[in-house]
Amino acid sequence: MAHTKSAQKRIRQTEVRTERNRAAKSRIKTLRKKALTAIAAGDKAIAATAVSALSAAVDKAAKTNLIHSNKAANIKSKTAKAFAAAGA
């Protein structure tokens, strides 16, 4: 266990950040699943909003360095490609 006040504070800060990052990553995974299931179901309106929400969440995560910018681009590209293929 940490002995100094500053070390204890750093531990508390790390716990808060870890929980926030875990929630954001989980949200991205959930949005990705929703988008892909909507695309597979063939519902264009729901799929379009789901892809848009996923894109925004991924961009925000990449901006804060939660995920790498290339990973964000890959996620967006794959979902957009699946959406385009389903619409064609």
Image (cartoon, rainbow, N blue to C red):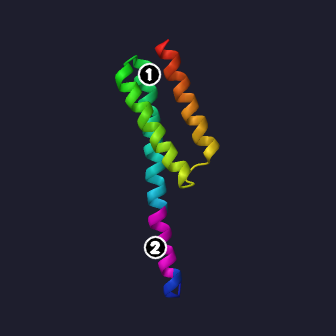
Q: Mark 1 or mark 2: name the one nearer the start of the chain.
A: 2
Residue drawn at 38 percent across, 30 percent down: 49
**Tag 2's secondary structure?**
helix
Q: Is residue 10 magenta?
A: yes
Asked if residue 63 is positioned above or below residue 77 in the image, the reply reads below
Disc 1 residue crowd, few under 14, some 14–19, many 20+, Cα 10 Å: many
Residue drawn at 49 percent across, 22 percent down: 83
Q: CA distance from mark 1 to mark 2?
A: 41 Å
- Magenta residue span: 8-17
**Front disc: 1 or 2:** 1
Closest to the observer, 52 or 30 = 52
Q: Quadrant of residue 70?
A: top right
Q: Residue furthest right?
A: 70
Amino acid at dot 2: Arg
Q: Are marks 1 and 2 in contact (CB under 8 Å)?
A: no
Image coordinates of residue 36 in percent, x first then y, are 46, 27
Amino acid at dot 1: Ile
**Residue pointed to by mark 1:** 39
Closest to the observer, 71 or 34 = 71
Disc 2 residue crowd, few under 14, some 14–19, many 20+, Cα 10 Å: few
**Residue pointed to by mark 2:** 12
